[in-house]
Amino acid sequence: MHPGTAVHLRRVLAGQQVDPQAGTGGLGTGVGRCVLRHAPTLGPHGPDCPWSGDSRRATFRRVATEVLAMVLAGGEGKRLMPLTADRAKPAVPFGGMYRMIDFVLSNLVNGGYRKLVVLTQYKSHSLDRHISKTWRLSTLLGGYVAPVPAQQRLGPQWFAGSADAIHQSMNLINDEQPKYVVVFGADNIYRMDPQQMLDQHIESGAGVTVAAIRQPLAMADQFGVIEVDADGRRISAFREKPADAHGLPDAPHEVFASMGNYVFTTSVLVDAVTQDAQDPDSKHDMGGSIVPMLVERGEAAVYDFRDNDVPGQRESERGYWRDVGTLDSYYDAHMDLISVNPEFSLANPEWPIFTDPQTFPPARTVHGSHGRVGSAMECLLAPGSVVSGSTVSRSVLSPGAHVHSWAQVDSSVLMHGVQVGRNAIVRNAILDKNVVIHEGAKVGVDLARDRELYTVSENGIVVIGKGQQVVP
């Protein structure tokens, strides 16, 4: 699909009426005939407008009525402790004012999907509350984003893995009767138009299509690697962290690493998870069990994430995807946001990242007298944050974060309500909600001392859990 089409489809799906004389950006007052000038024709699945008289269904009609999106948000996130001590991994705040779950949900909604279920399990209260408060779609158009906890429908056991989560939630598929099921993970940072992946899936006739990102061959032992046939599309093998991986047909120095995003033909998914549930030796995992099963059947294809065109995205951001499963990767992803030309920009009005529109006043930098100047350089300052007579550099401040006079904050992530007292120093740190750094205290200056009191990552990032008090 042409990138401009997705923006147009969002307007149609949101209930806005389209000017019959306008192009993909035109809006008018009459119902008229919808215009999809850039939409491609994909054989029997061509995306012509249903009001045109053509029997082929429109792309936006397909994604709204024939696709169910399932988001796997039940991860415990042990490697992100202490940030996951009191919340599920997808509920961890990110980028000053978002939560991780917002990125996948924004991609799906921007792509035109209107029936979304979020499968939750561990410590899901804050995640459920965030989804319920924030993600409200138009019921007039049949849209919804529903958090679905583990319900033990098949007996007194929790989800044994991502495939088992879908098997135990089969009632959701039975209720909607979709032709296709999109299964995405909930804890990665990226932009993606999922409709383009669905289009390829339908064209290929595969039972499952797996999204993949290119990585250097030398790093193959760090990923689940997808090996493909000579055509570059059909998956020939799915191997977990192989030491002897083979390069791609068009790039021998690269491999495909699985992103954990899948598009299934519904009948194939139902059959696979049902069969997997009968295997007592299975890991009941999408990547470890279901995909290898379908690879053996010759029903699995790969989608090259590099080919995904996101409206409004700079070319330098093409293919940006971060798995923030560790404290260091979580920190590094924040540092990607703050340069003059960030590796990943949160500012894209054509493909916005949606979140809870909390009511906070504008961010402030105050005091300008000699020796007491509030300054922030290469920073993200969320609404409600205050830099008061202090110096903040290369950092992300969330709503309510307040850095007081003569304090120094460098290369750090401050979550909601963090208070940094006068003359305090914070370096290379992640401070969870409502942490208080008292006057004169130091974090990230003496790592030996910090390791005795707090969590310190492999790369030396100091992480302080929710509500802790740090004294000199």
Image (cartoon, helix red, strand yellow):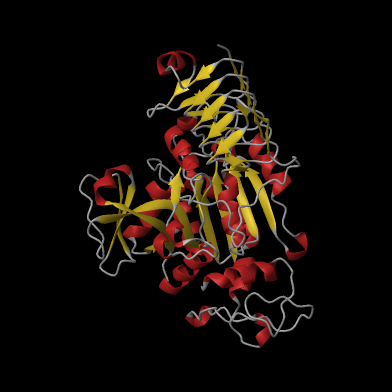
User: In the image, what residue occupies the spot 76% across and 60% down?
Assistant: 139
Choose between 365 and 160: the one closer to the eye: 365
Q: x, y percentage for residue 124?
A: 62, 36
**Would residue 69 be visible to someone looking at this image?**
no
Check the image and report above or below for 187 versus 467: below
Left/right of residue 458 with respect to residue 95 in the rendered view:
left
Q: Nearer the viewer, residue 119 or 404?
A: 404
* Corner quadrant of residue 351: bottom right
Give the residue drawn at x 54%, y 78%.
Answer: 39
Residue with the most extreme left position: 244
**Above/below status of 439 relative to 165:** above
Q: State the image quarter where residue 452 is shown.
A: top left
Count the marks: how many? 0
Image quadrant in which the C terminus is located: top right
Residue 249 place in picture, x, y as percent = 24, 64
Closer to the camera, 310 or 207? 310
Residue at the outermost front position: 370
Q: Position of residue 318 (x, y in %)?
A: 44, 59
The residue closer to the viewer here, 283 or 358, is: 358
Residue 419 location, x and y as percent? Answer: 64, 24
Seen in the picture, residue 116 relative to 92 is either above or below; the reply is below
- Res. 183 visible in picture: yes
